[in-house]
Image (tube, rainbow, N blue to C red):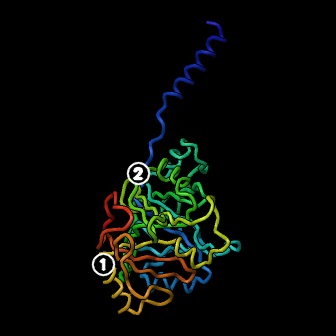
Amino acid sequence: MDCRLLAAAFLAALTLSASAAPAPQEPKITGISHLAVYTSNPAATEHYYRDLVGAARLPDPENPQGVRYALSATQFVEVLPLPPNAGINRLDHTAWNVSSAEGMRRYLAAKGWKTPAKVTKGSDGSRWFTVLDPEENKVEFVQLAAHAKAPDAPNVIGTHIIHVGFLVHSRAKEDTFYRDILGFKPYWFGGMQEGKLDWVSQQVPDGHDWLEYMLTSGPSGSGIPATMTQHQLGVLDHLSIGEKSVPEAYKVLEAGNRLGGVHDKEPKIGKDGKYQFNLYDPDDIRLELMNFHASQKPCCSPFTAEDPSE
């Protein structure tokens, strides 16, 4: 056979083999890993997360300058030094637990999403990588260490971060990533006023934790509105710890003199029909204690997926 014909046949075989290769399958996204926030006062932040919230202080395998405040073997708040150009922003990234970090990296790359060339391995054996969502929020995917241990946190006010939320301008734009590519599923939506949408919640595809879009009025696009204060932004950029009973958890905080700093006057029932109580860290990031289940019928829309549980 002519050499040119051999070369053509070989190239055709390679092309056929490549086209027959199956597309990478999406690894499981099982729940929230952590919320990473900045601090302008590490001592005050440590008092808040360790003494008031009751989390365990641990070293940070991702960043030697950071600290982890662990609620459980799989979830924590990561606290990082405040960058010089942060302005009023105190949120670094949200993070999700996945069955395979490398598998998720390959899956997103196959979908055309910009990903790093490789995952990073931590000193604890965990693996992770970071991407930007459509509005340029940092999102991290974490594969847990093989033998993650529960922290020594006997006084923690709750062990399960059931949702995280952050400022979003365009629901439709963000949905192209979280819904269309990652497969997050609808959970609930609502607003402070009839006919106005303020919150859109969607659960991970392989669990019950959820992401909450905190919708901000104004033109679509990324960035913090110029008129927004640090506290207003902290209301939007938040995490929520699940409780069997928020009123009972409030009593525990009150009895233990653990209600320092800024917080609600008392628990209340939110628009979703669930009891909640808000506390704020020294840099205004909101921590919302929330009942796992609703006590009343929610406004605006029904729940369309199962509630999380302890």
Q: Is residue 251 above or below residue 17?
A: below
Instruction: Identify the disc placed on residue 308.
Output: none
Q: Earlier in the sequence, mark 2 or mark 1?
A: 2
Quadrant in the picture for the N terminus? top right
Label 2 is placed on what type of residue? Answer: Lys
Q: Nearer the viewer, mark 2 or mark 1?
A: 1
Nearest the camera: 198 or 34?
198
Q: Is residue 89 left or right of residue 174?
A: right
Instruction: Identify the disc placed on residue 245.
Output: 1
Q: How many marks?
A: 2
* Residue 120 seen by the camera: no
Q: Is residue 305 left or right of residue 99?
A: left
Q: Secondary structure at mark 1?
A: loop
Label 1 is placed on what type of residue? Answer: Ser
Q: Position of residue 223 (x, y in %)?
A: 64, 64
* Residue 20 seen by the camera: yes
Quadrant in the picture for the C terminus? bottom left
Residue bearing the label numbered 2: 28
Dot 2 and dot 1 residues touching (CB under 8 Å): no
| Identity of the residue drawn at 40% across and 80% down | 277
As drawn, the residue found furthest toward the front would be: 194
